[in-house]
Image (spheres, rainbow, N blue to C red):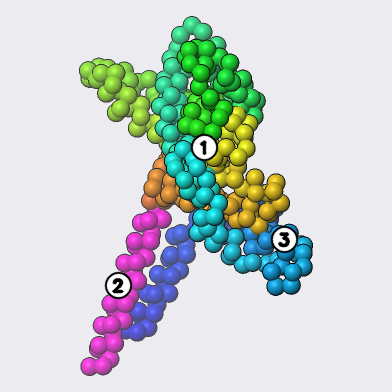
Amino acid sequence: MVTAVETQGASSRKAKKNALSDGQGTLAWILVAPTLAVILFVVGIPIVLSVIESFYKTSNGIDPTTGMAETGTKFVGLENYLNALTSNSTAVDGVFGSMPRLMNAFVNNVWFTVICVVIETILGVAMALIMARAFKGTGLVRAAILVPWAIPTIVSAKLWFVIFQADGVANKILGKEILWLGDSSASQLAVIMADVWKTAPFIGLLTLAGLQTIPAEVYEAAKVDGATAWQQFTRITLPMVKPALVVAVLFRTLDTMRMFDLPYGLIGPNKYSVETLSMFAYNEAVSQRYGPAAAYSILLFLLICLVAFLFIKLLGADVVGDDETRAKTAQRKRMRALHKQQVKRTKANQTITSGESAA
């Protein structure tokens, strides 16, 4: 009996290996190896160097023990991270109240990300619905909508800088004297408007790609069944365009979280109402405080990784909307479930065999 059980276990292990591998794993690794090597060189090495730098601190003061001037760098371990998360000595007054500068930058990051992505998603879907319609001048409308996205971000920032000046177009249209470029909530509103104007077409472009994959016969069948325009939008358009829309929202979320050039070029440095984590880390770096700057950058990197992981984890394989990927994922789940059942059955047989031997 024991021999039979061992044979069954060996066969199950062999079956698992063959079932989870389609025989193309080696070829796949060979094909992606050059890309992985490039990514490791241009991404992995800078990350490792930044992590190492975050453990050091530039010494440019007086040593309290010896009274001598300190120069160079010294290893401080996690001190830069602990100071970033716990120190209140650098409290600043932002739009959301007085708080440590790092926390103020984090709150600004979250605020810009939520507000900008929500507005850009709504406007992007509306743009895609307009561009998907066939009418005279469709090409001109599509080009006009996509122009802001094609303009470099720093150029957009300077363009809106002119608009939001005290005697600029914005104040003349509103008939008010708002200090858009100061350090207030109006500055945040200026950054949000500029960002939405520039990047909403990106979401519209990806959503348009998803709309063009929906067969016209689906809408014709819905019309025959008496579906209203709203029902067609909520029950046909949104579900079928979801994979492309989710990817667009994911990209924009990650891009907005590392926002730097737009508020920096539009409002300027050291404006706490619009300062983001990237701007804060940059300011520390230009002040030759490389250790804290690296620590802030690593914290921002971990935050972006966490958000990306949650997006992928919550949305699963549907993020790419690929039938083949979904089929492979379902097959892996079935094989894992089958393997667990075989393991349980093997353990049960071993228990029974041991009981018979004891008897």
* Extent of the magenta region: 331-359
Determine the CA span between mark 1 and mark 2.
62 Å
Q: Which residue does the image show at 48% across and 6% down from the upper left? A: 136
- Residue of label 3: 61
Q: Nearer the viewer, mark 2 or mark 3?
A: 3
Q: Nearer the viewer, residue 6 or 32?
A: 32
Q: Amino acid at mark 2?
A: Arg
- 83 lies left or right of 134: right
Going from the N terminus, do you reach mark 1 or mark 2 first? 1
Q: Is residue 344 magenta?
A: yes
Secondary structure mostly taken by the magenta-highlighted segment of the chain = helix
Look at label 3 and name its amino acid: Gly
Q: Which of these two is toward me, 26 or 195?
A: 195
Confirm or deny contact between disc 1 and disc 2 (CB under 8 A). Answer: no
261, 188: nearer the viewer? 188
Q: Name the residue furthest bottom.
A: 359
* Disc 1 element: loop
Q: Which mark is residue 273?
A: 1
Camera-nearest residue between 52 and 211: 52
Residue at 40% in and 27% down: 122
**Image spot of residue 350 (x, y percent):** 31, 81
In percent of the image, x 46 and y 38: which residue is there? 95
Residue 345: give its label.
Answer: 2
3D distance between C-alphas at marks 1 and 3: 31 Å
Is 103 rendered above or below residue 119? Answer: below
Q: Which amino acid is tagged 1?
A: Ser
